[in-house]
Image (spheres, rainbow, N blue to C red):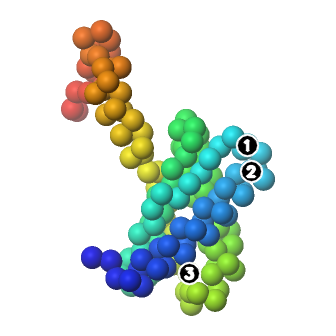
Amino acid sequence: MESNRQKKIAGILQEDLADVLQRSATEGGMRGVIISVSKVNVTVDLSIAKVYLSVFPNKEAKPILEGVRSNTPLIRHELAKRTRHQLRRMPALEFFIDDSLEYIDGIERSLKGKENPLDDPDLLEKRKKS
């Protein structure tokens, strides 16, 4: 169960992070790429923030995640400047890709019969548990 303090800090971080990441993507010449922060979870001791990113188009997700992770110190510094009046200590940031939208889309496609394994036998291989 998250405390109100955790929720409040997560909300502040989510809003500012979305702004920082989208601005850096645009300035970095990645026009047409949308980065949104779908969720932020802050640990009980407020030392770590797990940040879940949703990237569109999805094929850009891996390179963007790598770029964000390699620039974490800069992102953390920029956030610290923005939140210095709200937060005493900036939590360490951990970034992950939120693929829940893609997962939901896959389920919808299956339900609509767009991915029928009888029509496309290659789909069965993908669905086998390893």
Residue in the picture at 41% in, 69% down: 41
The three-letter amino acid code for the residue at tag 1 is Arg
**Picture disc at residue 26:** 2
- Of 111 and 44, the residue lying toward us: 111
Residue at the image point whose x is 56% and y is 54% from the top: 36
- Is 59 placed above or below 78 here? above
Q: Residue under label 1, please give it.
A: 31
Q: Do the residues labelled 1 and 2 touch (CB within 8 Å)?
A: yes
Mark carried by residue 74 = none
Task: Give how far across and how far down residue 53 sits, in percent.
Answer: 51, 54
Query: Farthest residue in the left direction?
Result: 129
Residue 119 % position (x, y): 30, 9
Give the residue pinned by disc 3: 90
Q: In which quarter of the image is the N terminus?
A: bottom left
Between the residue at mark 3 and the residue at mark 2, the CA separation in whole angstroms equals 25 Å
The answer to whether residue 35 shows anywhere in this view is: yes
Q: State the separation of the CA atoms marked 1 and 2.
A: 5 Å
Q: Which element type, helix, strand or loop, lies under badge 2?
A: helix
Residue 103, given in percent of the width and then of the height, sits at: 36, 40
Residue type for callout 3: Met
* Mark sitting earlier along the chain (1/2): 2
